[in-house]
Amino acid sequence: MEANGLGPQGFPELKNDTFLRAAWGEETDYTPVWCMRQAGRYLPEFRETRAAQDFFSTCRSPEACCELTLQPLRRFPLDAAIIFSDILVVPQALGMEVTMVPGKGPSFPEPLREEQDLERLRDPEVVASELGYVFQAITLTRQRLAGRVPLIGFAGAPWTLMTYMVEGGGSSTMAQAKRWLYQRPQASHQLLRILTDALVPYLVGQVAAGAQIIFAKDGHFALEELAQAGYEVVGLDWTVAPKKARECVGKTVTLQGNLDPCALYASEEEIGQLVKQMLDDFGPHRYIANLGHGLYPDMDPEHVGAFVDAVHKHSRLLRQN
């Protein structure tokens, strides 16, 4: 530690590095835990903070994003913070209109329908400069965390963003996006390249702004390929068996996940039992506990706390045996 208590980038020295050490495959005293969408509508303070602004106006406010990021850490002993933002700020920066419709979710009034629609997109080189508000939020949050836990930055994977941009919103089948793959293969490759060229400097910019780990959402579908691509951590949803995942990725990649979020509707006692089973299945090494997807708006904060506490409790006991 430097004499003034600041790290090499001028940020406060990190006090709890359990999450990072687990990501690097080092020994830890317990299994670190965080939750996707831990800054979310299940928290009454989140709803109160968000009430004054529409969703994407909130995303463009570094102060609001910082506050929303910190709220779950005031309630729960989480081992990481994840910056409040949205994957769809990237299509916005590329020039597409995106609105958040209450009760429906994100909507693109003019989705990509034909190959020539790609001409409407901005040069991907401008995306990072358009998203300076995200970098400002990361820097502000890293300062205000005061070294309590690491800060995660994130972006959507290219295919995930392509599905939204072509479908015009969320889709369970992704039929329109898949149609592009079959009927417009060259245009599909072009769009995926545009997104990749936009995402790389965006993620690099997040690290430069203070993010200590980067999370690519919806990138868990090809475990063996991801393990060979150089990633340190691969996240799983609840449909993937831990043993099978470990066989796919080998012993040099950390796994993250993968409790079914709906398990948090169970009693606190049953949550503890499910967490114990999950920890037993993954084992104590190269593992970060999480849900297999994000928290839902109607979940009880007390049950989220029970999940976090159960991970810490049972993982310490697991290491004693």
Image (cartoon, rainbow, N blue to C red):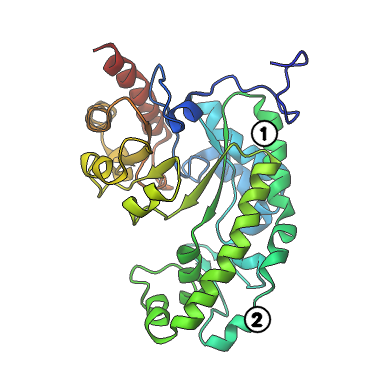
Q: Tell me which amino acid carries mark 1.
A: Arg
Left or right of 282? Residue 196 is right
The percent coordinates of residue 212 (x first, y second) are 59, 36
From what the image shows, is residue 48 above or below residue 87? above
Where disc 2 sits, the SS reads helix
- State yes or no: discs 2 and 1 in contact (Cβ < 8 Å): no
Q: Tell me which amino acid carries mark 2.
A: Arg
Q: Quadrant of residue 319?
A: top left
Compare residues 245 and 301 and report the one nearer the observer: 245
Q: Quadrant of residue 242?
A: top left
Compare residues 14 and 285 and report the one nearer the observer: 285
Marking on residue 120: 2
Where disc 1 sits, the SS reads helix
Alpha carbon distance from label 2 to label 1: 35 Å
Marking on residue 181: none
Say which quadrant the N terminus sits in.
top right
Does any portion of residue 101 appear in the rendered image? yes
Left or right of 238? Residue 117 is right
Residue located at (48% from left, 26% from top): 21
Q: Count residues near mark 2 (Cα–Cα under 10 Å), then give few for <14, some for 14-19, many for 20+.
A: few
The percent coordinates of residue 246 (x first, y second) are 27, 40
User: What residue is pinned by disc 1?
Assistant: 142
Residue located at (32% from left, 51% from top): 224
Does any portion of residue 104 appear in the rendered image? no
Left or right of 64? Residue 41 is left
The percent coordinates of residue 101 (x first, y second) are 53, 66
The percent coordinates of residue 279 (x first, y second) are 27, 29
Residue located at (50% from left, 29% from top): 20
